[in-house]
Amino acid sequence: MNKTHKKIIENLPKRNELRLKKLYTGIQLLCVSLITIISGPILIQIGFVKSKGLVNLYSILGVLVCVLAIILIYTGIKKIGDYIFNKNVR
């Protein structure tokens, strides 16, 4: 065995740990997005029920939470896809 093969074999456990960490963070992001998926429409509904003025803070906050949910879902699925298709760390 030459030195490059030896380095590759030594780095395999580290690479697998990084890949598993990427999968774990992707699953965590998807779990957090579940909270935002549920709370966003609830805040929008509360805003419509309690709307007295032109600017409704509950509705604006609900829309921002829904946008955050979309962003979290995208990044979580991207990290899991990178794990599945064995992409490099970005």
Image (spheres, rainbow, N blue to C red):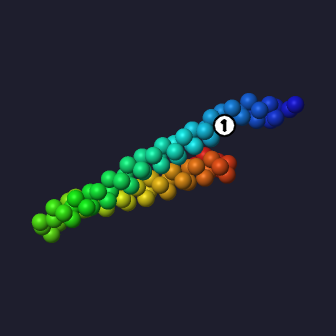
Residue 18 seen in this snapshot: yes
Q: Which x, y percent locates residue 7? A: 76, 32
As drawn, the residue found furthest toward the bottom would be 54
Element type at mark 1: helix
Kindly indicate the quadrant of the structure image that contains residue 61.
Answer: bottom left
Callout 1 amino acid: Asn
Q: Which x, y percent locates residue 10? A: 74, 30
Answer with left or right where residue 10 lies relative to residue 49.
Answer: right
Answer with left or right where residue 1 lies relative to residue 90.
Answer: right
Q: Which x, y percent locates residue 59? A: 24, 62
Q: Which x, y percent locates residue 18? A: 61, 38
Q: Report the residue at 16% width, 61% height from top.
A: 50
The quarter of the rendered structure image containing the N terminus is top right
Query: How many discs mark residues in the rendered view?
Result: 1
Q: Report the residue at 86% width, 32% height from top.
A: 2
Residue 31 or residue 88, whichever sits in front? 31
Q: Report the residue at 80% width, 35% height from top.
A: 4
Which residue in the structure is indicated by mark 1? Answer: 16
Residue 61 seen in this snapshot: no
